[in-house]
């Protein structure tokens, strides 16, 4: 039986990075956030393509991701670790030449004691209250940290996907208060901050979701197509029900297709009865509940039995599905499961 196919356009990822790089301006370096295996799309393919496009600095979530990425990209690019220097990370950080973004006095002490002289960065909390040193902590150790020559000082915006949110200006002011006058490169934002404008760009931007076709970069090129094989078709009579819980009842004679994918593959159960699947431009409603491995689709509008139906395609992107499920495009992408046959087109696809 044919497997469900997740087609990934590396050229689109690179085009999205180039567009965000151009927006960041000539004085700002543009890195790439490639955590969670490039948001579920495969760092082994995405990272070399991004290097060909000009990326020379990456960000990952944890040291283990950084060590894996180092084997992929070789010795040249800088690899920053958002979670900093956690207990037990010294060997990975040293061996893979990672740059931990130190988030606390405890992490700074650990790093200076276990890896003296090894490159590091600092993450400051400008108001998100998630990671980074607060103003008091930074004030206590800033002089010591700056003596050790950090390669970057960064913070992260909580509401950059809402351009008019007052939190953006508050965090910008706080970041400036904490860092103005230091002779260290600075970074405040990811995709959303690039779109907010030059005052948020500083010395480095580090886009993530925008590379992979998601909001808030509305002009991003679509990156993925998810095509699901049809296993079986059947005719329904009026009054017949479909799937678990009898949640859908045929109002008229219908033609139904059962396709191979479900919540075990990242098609969220919250999507039950909401999206369309597509054959070309023809929309076919998903009916009944999403089950673990199967979806049921009304294909009455089609003239012929389809071989595959597309769930993610130009007519219905990751953010469209996210809206239906009450979530965000990040979750849709990173939930896509390992059973899909991933295929790559475009730059560095070989």
Image (cartoon, rainbow, N blue to C red):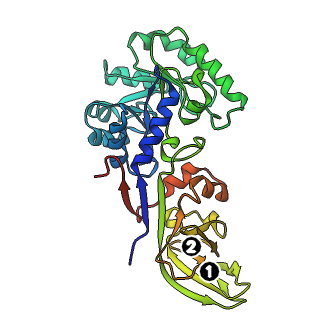
Residue drawn at x 59%, y 82% is 256
Image quarter for residue 34?
top left
Q: Position of residue 7 (x, y in %)?
A: 42, 59
Please tell me how crowded label 1 is: few (under 14), some (14-19), or many (20+) other residues with Cα within 10 Å. some
Label 2 sits on residue: 291
Q: Give the SS element for disc 1.
A: loop
Q: Earlier in the sequence, mark 1 or mark 2?
A: 1
Tell me if residue 194 comes above or below residue 4 in the rendering. above
Residue 72 to residue 245: above or below: above
**Given contact means CB atoms under 8 Å apart, are the residues at marks 1 and 2 in contact?**
yes
Vertical position of residue 108 compared to residue 64: above or below: above
Q: Residue 325: horizontal and vertical position, in percent? A: 65, 59
Q: Which residue is mark 1?
A: 243
Q: Count numbered badges in the picture.
A: 2
Q: Nearer the viewer, residue 191 or 130?
A: 191
> Which picture quadrant has residue 78?
top left
């Amino acid at each position: 039986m044919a497997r469900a196919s997740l087609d990934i356009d590396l050229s689109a990822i690179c085009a999205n990075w180039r567009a965000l790089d151009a927006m960041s301006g000539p004085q700002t370096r543009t890195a790439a956030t490639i955590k969670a295996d490039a948001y579920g799309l495969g760092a082994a393919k995405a990272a070399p393509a991004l290097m060909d496009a000009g990326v020379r600095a990456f960000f990952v979530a944890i040291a283990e991701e950084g060590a894996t990425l180092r084997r992929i990209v070789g010795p040249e690019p800088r690899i920053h670790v958002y979670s900093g220097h956690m207990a037990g990370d010294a060997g990975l950080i040293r061996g893979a030449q990672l740059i931990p973004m130190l988030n606390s006095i405890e992490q700074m002490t650990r790093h200076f004691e276990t890896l003296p002289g090894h490159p590091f960065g600092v993450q400051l909390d400008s108001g998100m209250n998630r990671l980074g040193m607060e103003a008091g902590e930074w004030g206590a150790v800033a002089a010591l940290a700056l003596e050790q020559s950090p390669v970057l000082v960064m913070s992260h915006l909580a509401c950059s996907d809402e351009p008019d949110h007052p939190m953006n200006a508050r965090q910008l002011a706080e970041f400036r208060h904490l860092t103005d006058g230091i002779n260290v490169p600075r970074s405040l934002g990811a995709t959303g901050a690039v779109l907010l404008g030059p005052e948020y760009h500083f010395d480095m931007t580090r886009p993530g979701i925008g590379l992979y076709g998601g909001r808030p970069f509305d002009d991003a090129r679509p990156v993925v197509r998810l095509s699901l094989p049809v296993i079986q078709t059947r005719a329904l009579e009026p009054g017949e029900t479909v799937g678990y819980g009898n949640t859908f009842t045929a109002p008229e004679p219908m033609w139904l297709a059962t396709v191979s994918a479900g919540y075990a593959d990242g098609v969220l159960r919250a999507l039950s009865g909401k999206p369309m699947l597509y054959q070309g431009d023809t929309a076919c409603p998903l009916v009944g509940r999403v089950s673990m491995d199967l979806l049921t689709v009304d294909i009455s509008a089609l003239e012929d039995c389809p071989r595959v139906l597309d769930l993610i395609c130009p007519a219905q992107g990751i953010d469209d599905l996210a809206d239906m499920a009450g979530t965000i495009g990040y979750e849709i992408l990173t939930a896509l499961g390992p059973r899909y046959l991933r295929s790559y087109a475009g730059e560095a696809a070989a």
